[in-house]
Amino acid sequence: MDERVALSLVGEYVEAAGDDCAVIDDRVVTTDMLHERTDFPAGTTRYTAGWRAVGASLSDVAAMGADATAAVAVYGAPEFHEPELEAFLEGCTDVCAAVDAEYVGGDLDGHEEFTVATTAVGQTDDPVLRSGATAGEALCVTGQFGRSAAAIRLFEAGDTERANELFRFEPRVAAGRAVAPYATAMMDSSDGLARSLHQLAEASDCGFAVDDVPLHPAVESVAENADERRELGVHFGEDFELVFTVPADAVEGVQAATQVDITRIGSVTEAGVTMDGEALPDRGYTH
């Protein structure tokens, strides 16, 4: 049973499952788990690991259009070393500070593999779900794609300083709040843009036609050709940008309301997910 099948099984038991966070009254809550083997390439510092792990959960809060309030993390490792633990805690604290949230602690546990489990909490009285997109609306994203893919290539090449820098993304909490009054559906792109679009399409019972995708400049330095650039930007995942829909006449208002780049990459259609007129495979990051 792969992760997607397992998630569908969870959905059968948990009626409210399916969005980036659980909604409890005016609170949103999310949890994530990251492992050294699958999520932290060789050369990832503990500071970056703390930042990225907590940031992944804060990104889910952002996708609900909520204010981020607090986060906790479980740190599991075969051994505890003071410099590594201190660096990890600094990363957790700094990423929270970047989005006006507070890092409030967690737990320590012995584990055969470095593993981090994080939980983030946010607040909103009007969360944005994945299920409200309607044909004719604009499909938009924050930022640029392929950042994490480029980081992986740089880790592999031994350029760990640049790779760590790229791995420390800023969760789009402020952008999510700004977009929320306009958005009809929203999620983050942790599993890749292509997979996110298929997930949004399923939740909203619609389709998408994608025209172009903004790529991070680092992609150009690690990709050999256009096909590879597309693969890294559209399918690799782990970029934690927001993918959302708004009425077509609201795009300029959204752009004016946010301090990060907003790009209209296409439109909501009745059915199917295409890019440049061809079917876009439902393929992305697999945990």
Image (spheres, rainbow, N blue to C red):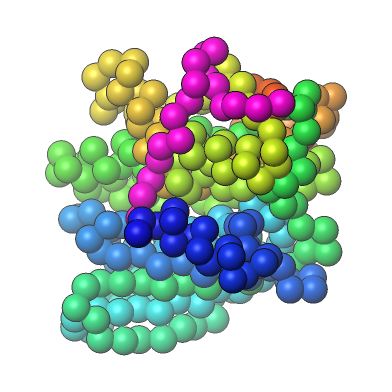
Name the image quarter holding residue 78.
bottom left
Q: Which residues are magenta?
A: 270-287
User: Quadrant location of residue 84?
Assistant: bottom left
Q: Where does residue 74 sit, x and y in percent of width and height?
A: 40, 79
Q: Residue at x 35, y 86 (%)?
A: 108
Residue 283 in percent (x, y) is at 41, 37
Which residue is nearer to you in this view: 43 or 251? 251
- Main secondary structure of the magenta stretch: loop
Is residue 286 a member of the stretch shown in magenta?
Answer: yes
Q: Is residue 272 left or right of residue 180?
A: left
Q: Is residue 182 visible?
A: yes
| Of the pair 236 and 146, the residue shown nearer to us | 236
Residue 177 in the figure: left or right of residue 30: right
Residue at 31% in and 50% down:
164
Residue situated in front as seen by the camera: 27 or 278: 278
Look at the image and tell me in which quarter the C terminus lies.
bottom left
At which x and y percent is residue 233? 41, 30
Would residue 176 be found to the left or right of residue 50 on screen?
right
Is residue 179 among what the camera can see?
no
- Quick check: is 81 in the magenta stretch? no
The residue that appears at 39% across and 23% down in the rendered structure is 230
Name which quarter of the figure residue 274 lies in: top right
